[in-house]
């Protein structure tokens, strides 16, 4: 395609951008207009290998890191034939698949859901690494905003890309020098971005982002160069390019033109056709995502550890790396991404098991946000990706990445941190993650597994690896007695009745299962019979088993090594309020942070030991008798 035709196409994209945003009444025209020439070069200038008739076939990949420029991407995809151009005017409307920011679940041609700035380059890094693992020579392109480069995660990704010699990666920075609050130099000066990327070990080139031939030459050269360095292209552009009153005007970052503004904008672009059109009614449920509904069917068989096995204490984290290695031996394309803790999390055992595993274990250093998004990118290349860090960092620091990159895109990424709960011990409150179940449980598409012992943890990792989509596996530091036989079969969506009783039900998870069993023994000596349920799967919760037990006993206690807010207790209370309203008591950490001490001391101090469960059972029975 010749340069004149490409320039015409870029103008057509700008017309579509203005019409889309004008019809929607909201959106981001400025940065979409500045990137229109880059989009045209990529999709129509022979840079990207892609095929709208086979969107998932062999291809180069493009990640729109600056997801607010979605109108530019949608315009390019529609022009290329991924979906009808008429659909562009449904942008941002209820029932449209053209969301305000790209959604890879519902829009053909969109490789990754984006919108939270700073994450796209990390995803592109993981995707580039994943393609290389697959022996796929295709390239990966990412378009970033210059204001986005104020995000620290961009530089975590830059380090990772250079360290791993990702020469199949091209990062393009739309350097239009404006962000929401003004000029980038005035808001928080990112400095010379070319020098910065070069200092991080990238090959760098500056280009006029509106000179089509120059853009084609630079991108083509970067794609072809496989000399061991990732490539950064700093594209100097004009925000609002093509519309006189929008050019270099920061107020048009996220505002839609209306009335005369819309007419003038389109006239500037040489368009005199209809501004809008009558749209067919949109079905608001057409592109809704399905929720998880798993119903247990019949009682689950429980195989207990022998007394000898129970006496052999093991940490739930102990089998993590070993199980990953076994899964890889079975042909599952396992990759693991760690953040400088591979010995503690035991992913090192996976990497050391076989020479080929070493290439599938990525250490991002102390960069947990990058860890999650690299895993997201690896999953986009067809891998089953596990992340590993301490729970406080792997879920707390990386929550936005888990939410927006993993769960929103429903990727095959497994968040499997260790060192959760107060059993971290002497490291203290800063490292004792007691809010993670709550954080993970509230995320759509996320499943939550909280194993009680070594065998349950190994099973949880296996379930995570073989269950499509996001899964959270919570593991601990403390060595604990074994509850289950090594060959115990666990299922997603299941709870397990470990003791039958009639006076009260104790629903526990994780390390609290052993405390609940000890409490059952103590209460039995006093003539009180309790049913003990291991809520191995907190989400989706085994509503049937728990509700039937509550109906039988009429009183419930929940026990978790976690805050009583938002975790297992909340999940059980929500369930029972809808099914079997029942008196309930909560054993867990009472809305405070942890502190240093041994696990035994802390369990007594915070009231999560067997003695606390005993007292809670007595209280709830008394309440039941008052009803």
Image (cartoon, rainbow, N blue to C red):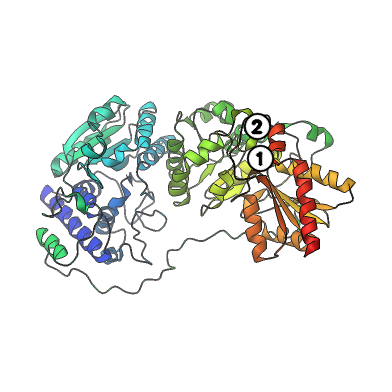
The residue tagged 2 is 318
**Residue 363: x and y, percent?**
47, 29
Image quadrant in which you'd find residue 476: top right
Above or below 580: residue 47: above
**Residue 190: x and y, percent?**
26, 34
**Residue 362: x and y, percent?**
47, 31
Above or below 483: residue 300: below
Lateral position of residue 250 relative to residue 624, left or right: left
Residue drawn at point x = 72 percent, y = 33 percent? 600
Q: Nearer the viewer, residue 564 or 363?
A: 564
The residue tagged 1 is 457
Q: Can residue 349 be seen in this view?
A: no
Q: Which of 596 and 184 is in front in this view?
A: 596
> Quick check: marks 2 and 1 in contact, CB under 8 Å?
yes
Q: Which of marks 2 and 1 is nearer the N terminus?
A: 2
Q: Can residue 198 be seen in this view?
A: yes
Lateral position of residue 152 relative to residue 475, left or right: left
């Amino acid at each position: 395609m010749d340069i004149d035709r490409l320039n015409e196409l870029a103008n057509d994209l700008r017309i579509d951008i203005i019409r889309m945003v004008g019809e929607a009444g909201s959106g981001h025209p400025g940065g979409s207009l500045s990137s229109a020439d880059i989009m045209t070069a990529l999709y129509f200038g022979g840079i990207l290998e892609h095929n709208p008739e086979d969107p998932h076939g062999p291809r180069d990949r493009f990640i729109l890191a600056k997801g607010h420029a979605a109108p530019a991407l949608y315009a390019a995809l529609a022009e290329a034939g991924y979906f009808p151009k008429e659909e562009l005017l449904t942008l941002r409307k209820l029932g449209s698949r053209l969301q305000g920011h790209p959604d890879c679940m519902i829009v053909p041609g969109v490789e990754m859901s984006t919108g939270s700035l700073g994450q796209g380059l990390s995803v592109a890094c993981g995707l580039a690494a994943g393609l290389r693992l697959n022996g796929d020579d295709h390239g990966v392109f990412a378009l970033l905003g210059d204001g986005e480069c104020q995000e620290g995660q961009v530089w975590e990704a830059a380090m990772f890309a250079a360290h791993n010699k990702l020469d199949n990666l091209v990062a393009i920075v739309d350097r239009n020098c404006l962000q929401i609050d003004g000029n980038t130099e005035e808001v928080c000066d990112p400095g010379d971005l070319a020098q910065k990327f070069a200092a991080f070990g990238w090959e760098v080139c500056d280009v006029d982002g509106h000179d089509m031939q120059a853009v084609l030459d630079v991108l083509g050269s970067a794609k072809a160069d496989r000399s061991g360095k990732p490539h950064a292209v700093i594209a100097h552009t004009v925000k609002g390019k093509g519309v006189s009153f929008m050019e270099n005007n920061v107020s048009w970052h996220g505002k839609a033109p209306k009335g005369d503004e819309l007419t003038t904008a389109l006239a500037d672009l040489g368009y005199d056709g209809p501004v809008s059109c009558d749209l067919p009614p949109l079905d608001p449920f057409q592109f809704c995502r399905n929720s998880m509904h798993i119903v247990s069917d019949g009682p689950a068989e429980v195989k207990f550890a022998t007394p000898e096995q129970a006496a052999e204490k093991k940490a739930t984290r102990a089998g993590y790396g070993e199980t990953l290695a076994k899964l890889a031996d079975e042909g599952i394309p396992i990759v693991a991404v760690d953040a400088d803790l591979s010995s503690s999390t035991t992913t090192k055992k996976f990497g050391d098991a076989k020479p080929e595993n070493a290439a599938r274990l990525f250490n991002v250093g102390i960069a947990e946000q990058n860890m999650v998004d690299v895993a997201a990118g690896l999953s986009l290349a067809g891998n089953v990706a596990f992340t590993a860090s301490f729970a406080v960092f792997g879920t707390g620091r990386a929550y936005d990445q888990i939410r927006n990159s993993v769960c929103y895109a429903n990727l095959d990424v497994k968040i499997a941190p260790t060192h959760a709960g107060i059993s971290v011990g002497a490291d203290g409150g800063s490292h004792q993650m007691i809010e993670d179940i709550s954080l993970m449980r509230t995320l759509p598409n996320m499943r939550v597994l909280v194993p009680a012992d070594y065998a349950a943890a190994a099973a949880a990792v296996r379930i995570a690896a073989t269950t499509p989509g996001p899964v959270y596996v919570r593991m601990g530091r403390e060595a604990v007695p074994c509850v289950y036989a090594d060959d115990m079969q666990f299922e997603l969506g299941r709870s397990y009745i470990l003791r039958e009783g009639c006076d009260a039900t104790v629903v526990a998870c994780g390390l609290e299962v052993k405390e609940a069993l000890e409490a059952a023994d103590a209460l039995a000596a006093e003539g009180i019979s309790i049913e003990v349920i291991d809520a191995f799967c907190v989400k989706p919760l085994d509503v049937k088993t728990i509700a039937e037990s509550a109906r039988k006993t009429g009183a419930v206690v929940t026990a978790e090594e976690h805050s009583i807010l938002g975790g297992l207790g909340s999940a059980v209370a929500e369930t029972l309020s809808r099914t079997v309203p029942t008196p309930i008591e909560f054993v867990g950490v009472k809305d405070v942070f942890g502190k240093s001490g041994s696990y035994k001391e802390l369990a007594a101090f915070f009231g999560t030991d067997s003695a606390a469960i005993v007292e809670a059972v007595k209280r709830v029975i008394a309440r039941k008798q008052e009803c």
